[in-house]
């Protein structure tokens, strides 16, 4: 990669392989049998990642991951439902905002941005309010990189007979989630994250029984997952114009995912990237926001240097000129910046990124190197 085509160390869009990009050079007819087969193969492969082919349907949807989150909430939560939204970052807050906009009753439980929600929290909240029907959880909160304890929380929700909706946007494909051991009504992810496709398509793994009973729930025609699935099951086609090139790119990315060794290999590479980054930044004196125990190997938030000569925009442009795109911080209380560990990158790229960061801060006279 060159500065003209930098490596994206962001949580998505992210750096993709040449093979994935080349898959977008072919135009597809949206009603063509070959494209319909591509969609069916895609959904089958995605279901295999969560071991969910017997329990869940994979429903693809045009748009970003947020489109899919809104579609899942609007389709699977009845209009008289009550959602408990667990929040420790910007994406939990966005989920609550979705509930507000689509007219679903909701309550929130918010912890600090460096504090995971615990199973004990959820136990207490469900005991206190029996009207709660669904619990919505961000698995890996992208605003910090914090990993919430999904398995423990899911067990509490199941014991109370409530329904779980998981925003796994930044974790799906890299962190294990098994539909046989974790009960959930919906798990939501997208094409442009750990599967290393391009952005433009979300998908929802919806429990078969819940989806079948959801007719008439949706607040939106375009975001009605029940109708989308029913139409695709009947015709093999998308209801409305599909993102054909995005589908083709994701199908190709999944072939590479499986060639690499699937989820265990993808997780190992990302974990190596993350550790390489953490070790290198520590040598520069840059501190990560989260302790290691709750740091997911997806994106790392770093405290910004306290030197008055530090300015994120200048820092960003200097690092970009050296071939790497970073991400601004999303915290409200402290100044931070974020570096992604996902995408078609290796620990060699992470070493190079640390060097670029050191050089940029040296040029700004923030670091003495």
Image: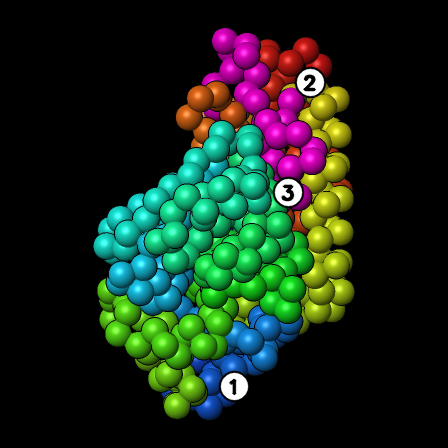
Q: Which residue in the structure is indicated by mark 1? A: 37
Answer with left or right where residue 63 lies relative to residue 325.
left
Residue 275, by quadrant, is top right
Q: Say if 234 sits above or below 154 in the image.
A: below
Residue 3, by quadrant, is top right
| In-front residue for pair 168/262 | 168
Is label 1 in a helix, a strand or a loop?
Answer: helix
Q: Using the numbered discs, state the Cα–Cα distance from disc 3 to disc 1 in whole angstroms.
A: 35 Å
Disc 3: CA contacts within 10 A as few (<14), some (14-19) or many (>=20): many
| Figure disc tally | 3
Q: Say if 195 sits above or below 318 in the image.
A: below
State which mark lies toward you, 2 or 3.
3
Residue name at image x 48 percent, y 72 percent: 207
Residue name at image x 62 percent, y 30 percent: 290
The boundaries of the magenta stretch are 287-312
Residue 278: x and y in percent read 71, 31
Q: Which residue in the structure is indicated by mark 3? A: 296
State which mark lies toward you, 3 or 1.
3
Residue 246 visible to an observer of this rendering: no
Among all residues in the image, which is located at the extreme top? 308
Disc marking residue 103:
none
| In-front residue for pair 128/271 | 128
Q: Which residue in the structure is indicated by mark 2? A: 285
**Pointer 2 or 1: first along the chain:** 1
**Pointer 3 or 1: first along the chain:** 1
Residue 299 visible to an observer of this rendering: yes
| Quarter in which the C terminus is drawn | top right
Q: Using the numbered discs, state the Cα–Cα distance from disc 2 to disc 3 in whole angstroms.
A: 21 Å
Residue 209: x and y in percent read 45, 77
130 in the magenta segment: no
């Amino acid at each position: 990669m060159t500065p003209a085509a930098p490596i994206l160390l962001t949580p998505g869009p992210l750096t993709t392989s040449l093979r994935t990009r080349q898959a977008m050079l072919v135009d597809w007819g949206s009603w063509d049998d070959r494209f319909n087969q591509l969609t069916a193969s895609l959904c089958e492969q995605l279901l295999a990642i969560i071991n969910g082919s017997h329990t869940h349907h994979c429903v693809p949807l045009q748009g970003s991951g947020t489109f899919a989150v809104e579609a899942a909430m609007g389709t699977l939560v009845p209009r008289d439902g009550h959602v408990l939204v667990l929040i420790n970052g910007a994406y939990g807050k966005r989920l609550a905002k979705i509930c507000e906009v689509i007219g679903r009753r909701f309550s929130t439980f918010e912890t600090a941005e460096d504090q995971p929600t615990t199973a004990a929290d959820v136990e207490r909240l469900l005991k206190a309010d029996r009207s709660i029907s669904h619990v919505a959880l961000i698995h890996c909160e992208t605003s910090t990189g914090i990993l919430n304890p999904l398995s423990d929380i899911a067990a509490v929700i199941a014991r109370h007979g409530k329904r779980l909706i998981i925003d796994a946007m930044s974790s799906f494909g890299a962190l294990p989630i098994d539909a046989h051991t974790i009960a959930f009504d919906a798990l939501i992810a997208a094409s442009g994250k750990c599967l290393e496709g391009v952005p433009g398509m979300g998908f929802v793994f919806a429990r078969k029984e819940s989806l079948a009973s959801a007719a008439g729930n949706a607040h939106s025609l375009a975001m009605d997952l029940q109708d989308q699935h029913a139409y695709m099951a009947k015709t093999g086609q998308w209801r409305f114009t599909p993102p054909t090139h995005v589908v083709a790119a994701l199908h190709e990315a999944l072939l590479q995912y499986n060639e690499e060794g699937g989820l265990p290999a993808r997780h190992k590479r990302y974990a190596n990237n993350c550790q390489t980054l953490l070790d290198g930044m520590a040598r520069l004196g840059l501190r990560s926001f989260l302790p290691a125990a709750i740091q997911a190997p997806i994106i790392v938030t770093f405290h910004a240097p306290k030197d008055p000569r530090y300015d994120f925009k200048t820092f960003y442009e200097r690092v970009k000129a050296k071939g790497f795109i970073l991400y601004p911080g999303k915290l409200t209380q402290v100044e931070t910046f974020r570096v992604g560990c996902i995408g078609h990158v290796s620990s060699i790229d992470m070493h190079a990124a640390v060097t670029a960061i050191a050089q940029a801060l040296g040029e700004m006279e923030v670091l003495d190197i």
